[in-house]
Image (spheres, helix red, strand yellow):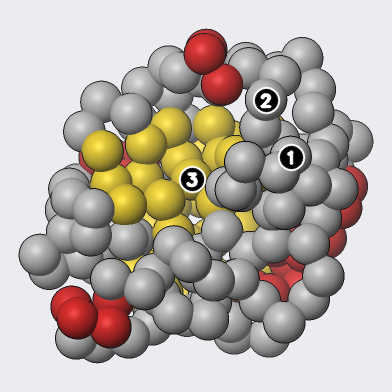
Amino acid sequence: MAEIKDPENTVIIETDTGNVVVELLPDVAPGHVERMKELARAGEYDNVAFHRVIDGFMAQTGDVANGDMEDNFNLRMAGTGGSDKPNLKAEFSSLPFDRGVLGAARSQNPDSANSQFFIMLADGHFLNGQYTVYGRVIEGMEHVDAIPKGEPPAAPGRMKSVKVATDT
């Protein structure tokens, strides 16, 4: 396993094919980092689908309101919800959207991020300065690459669990 320098600011996402280790960036986006840890510790991300996975772009997940639905009819609602927590204010930075970066998903309103996030499958610098960067994959990118593609995928990959490394 990759060396975890700051277990309190590292999350381990268990997927169907293996673990993805994400280093969170509290110095860059403290509000988003705290929200992710809060939802992970509450088990809100467990069994949530990757509902929008675009080859060569990104894999999106984290709709805790709708993303754990098992049937594809209801899963089509995934991507429309968030948590019961208030939306987050944007925390834009100069960090680029490189492959493996974790960013906050949101609507057209920059201050509408809540629980959803995406992991870049490739560089996407056109997103720079427009979305909040708050983490990066430090191990397991091959498991992100293996997530079934689609909007939503016919048989979506899921986050079996998301844990803060301190809690494992």
> Does 5 sit left or right of 66 as displayed?
right
> Does 17 sit left or right of 84 as displayed?
left
Identified at 45% across, 18% down, the residue is: 124
In the structure shown, which secondary structural element does the residue marked by tag 3 occupy?
A: strand
Q: Whole-Å distance between the Cαs marked 3 and 2?
A: 14 Å
Q: Is residue 95 above or below residue 142?
A: above
Q: Do the residues labelled 1 and 2 touch (CB within 8 Å)?
A: yes
Q: Which mark is residue 130?
A: 2
Of badges 3 and 1, nearer the viewer stands: 1
User: Which residue in the structure is indicated by mark 3?
Assistant: 118
Given residues 114 and 1, the one toward you in this image is 114
- The residue sitting at the front extreme is 108
Of badges 3 and 2, nearer the viewer stands: 2
Say what amino acid the circle numbered 1 marks.
Pro
Given residues 88 and 30, the one toward you in this image is 88
Identified at 28% across, 46% down, the residue is: 53
Q: Where is residue 2 in the image (x, y as percent from the top left)?
A: 52, 42
Identified at 56% across, 40% down, the residue is: 102
To which quarter of the image does residue 71 belong? bottom left
Q: Whole-Å distance between the Cαs marked 1 and 2?
A: 8 Å
Q: Which mark is residue 110?
A: 1
Dot 1: few (<14), some (14–19), or many (≥20) neighbours within 10 Å?
some
Dot 2: few (<14), some (14–19), or many (≥20) neighbours within 10 Å?
some
- The residue sitting at the left extreme is 154
Q: Is residue 156 above or below residue 99?
A: below
In the structure shown, which secondary structural element does the residue marked by tag 1 occupy?
A: loop
Q: Is residue 47 above or below residue 111?
A: below
